[in-house]
Image: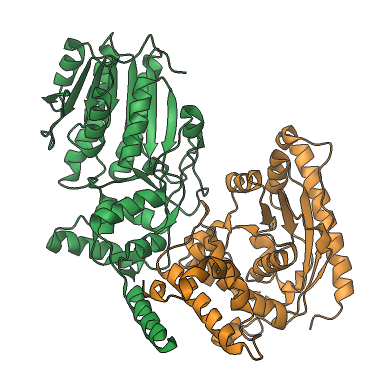
Chain colours: A orange, B green
Amino acid sequence: MTAHRRPREAPDEPDVAPVIPLTFADADAGTGSDAGADAEDRLSALLEFLRRRLNGDYEVDEFGFDRELTDTVLLPLVRVLYRYWFRVELRGTEHIPRSGRALVVANHSGTLPLDGLILQVAVHDHARRDLRLLGADLVYQVPVLGHLSRKAGHTLAHPADAHRLLSKDELVGVFPEGFKGVGKPFGERYRLQRFGRGGFVETALRAEAPIVPVAIVGAEEIYPKIGDVRALARLLGLPYFPITPTFPLLGALGLIPLPSKWLIRFGEPMTLKGYGPRDADDPMTVFDLTDHVRETVQQMLYDTLLERGPAF
Amino acid sequence: MSATPSAARVVLVTGVSRFLGARVASALQAEPGIERVIGVDTVPPTAPLGRTEFVRVDIRTPSIAKIISAERVDTVVHCSLETAQYGPRAKVKELNVIGTMQLLAACQRSPDVRKLVVRSTAAVYGSSPRDPAVFTETDEPVEAPSSGSAKDATEVEGYVRGLQRRRSDLTVTVLRFANFLGPDVDSPVTRYLRLPVVPTVLGFDPRLQFVHADDGAEVLRRMTLEDHPGCFNVAGDGVLLLSQALRRAGRPSVPVPEASVQLFGGLGRRFAGLSGFSSELLRWLMYGRVIDCSKLAAELRWRPAYSAEAAFADFVETVGDGRTPAQEMFERLTTVLGGSGR
């Protein structure tokens, strides 16, 4: 490619490549006398990044996770919402495991599952880890959403996928409430729904992974769901068709989330000591542990909600 | 696991006139322990087979049984499964399914046959949005393939299991291969990737896996020489996304809504002699498929020489590197910038 013909760039390439995300993110930071040289470096880094993207010169893992795309394009987009729109504050980030496998279990809300992406940014920025979220199969049936979700490191909420990720010592994120949680009416906000069938506990037991409980406060108010058009939902094959104060009243404008204040609390990892992979086959143990995790998250949720105060 | 007393001496290779059978036959005839390699196919081979004895026989007929008993074949390598959809579908299905039934019937009857190695395909896992990201050998497809060669392969595997039940003394190996790539491989996938402008399904970017034909032949060779009963996934290491693969090959692509892909494919088949889009290929282009090959690696203590990436690079070399419009534009842009920067 022509870029290689520029004599100054070629030796720089190995050094420039790894710092791309930083130069990219701080694009407006360069001031002072060497701004010209900086700008040129940044430009060549950007060109190198584009060249790699255009030539397919990057790697994805077996789940389709494209770390470069996620770190340089997808997460920075979410980070704008994270910082300036929702003004997310975190508590207990020391509880995010810095290494090794763990299952992050959080409450799910907001009509559209933005809470997953925000949680991913929080974990990425404060623990330098990729949160591998488990999503509903609906996500993978829908055009665009399916492959973007895989590129962002998510995969299907299937016990096999969760186990495979955990056995690779990844940090896996799951919302056991599923659609019941994300699509619950505004009146039921901050009240946890049933935690699925306890599949996440089975997975954690089998993989001998600790469970990190997480309470996300703020997502409930982004799209207050005050109604549901069942017939339309059935027609479109969706789990619900929400009515919010702004949608569909304001059309596409109604898709802008309300700027609620977010507070995310990470709880102390539950190591499930005294239990082993064999307990995953004992439904009573699984039910008990599921209830225990659910109560922990619910309690954290109430505490965090009190701490946050008003929603906006 | 390798048991020398029952080592292969007379090997029958089906589908010997095609890329995989030909490679396996030529690898096996180089083995000193193997006395004879008999290759069968319905069409004559395109390249000389060396010391492999070619017999033109239709495996759908009982004549295959005569060869197996008369030549005292002890090992059958069945790699004639046809994944292509050229020519009438009914005939391909006949060859795949009825041919396998005849072959297995002959194996069951013969007192000499001790081992059967069957080439199957990872397509038996299907492709759907509700599948786990990675298939292991024990996984059942959420949506079983309902048509095409994937269905044939599912049926073939079913008959092989039946034979295993009736002849438990046989060593049976079933190999589920990812999509083959190689300089001489002609399959719906290679034909698709060779299109001057590649249609992709709008909004989908599947994960793809490839296995190089040389690695495929090597696995079949090892399975023939050593005893490794069971079912194994075979693919090169690593995963490529379709978009990524097309960028690497420099193929211009055009996203087409799902509903019109088959229409375009049908037009292409009718007017341009292309192979069209089977529903199997279409699903693969939407949801992709990734298989776990750790069982094979552990059993053989061997990894494919070509990763998916390398196999694809080899393929690109044979079809010729191109350039997408975006790459063209980028190059022009950098030329302009480079010129003004000096």
The reply to whether residue A250 is visible in this rendering is no
* Residue A189 location (% of width, % of height): 77, 70
The N terminus of chain A, quarter of image: bottom left
Apparent side of residue A221 relative to residue B56 in the rendered image (left or right):
right
- In the rendered image, the vertical position of residue A183 relative to residue B26, given as above or below: below
- In the rendered image, the vertical position of residue B169 relative to residue A176, given as above or below: above
Compare residues B254 and B5 and report the one nearer the observer.
Answer: B5
Apparent side of residue B31 relative to residue A169 in the rendered image (left or right):
left
Residue at the image position 43 percent from the left and 23 percent from the top: B228
In which quadrant of the rendered view does residue A194 lie?
bottom right
How many discs mark residues in the rendered view? 0
- In the rendered image, the vertical position of residue B3 relative to residue A280, given as above or below: above
* Residue B255 location (% of width, % of height): 35, 69
In which quadrant of the rendered view does residue B303 lie?
top left
Apparent side of residue A98 relative to residue B289 in the rendered image (left or right):
right
Compare residues A241 and A289 and report the one nearer the observer.
Answer: A289
Residue at the image position 20 percent from the left and 37 percent from the top: B18
Compare residues A192 and B186 and report the one nearer the observer.
Answer: B186
* Residue A75 location (% of width, % of height): 61, 71
The C terminus of chain A, quarter of image: bottom right
The reply to whether residue B190 is visible in this rendering is yes
* Residue B74 location (% of width, % of height): 28, 14
Compare residues A296 and B288 and report the one nearer the observer.
Answer: B288
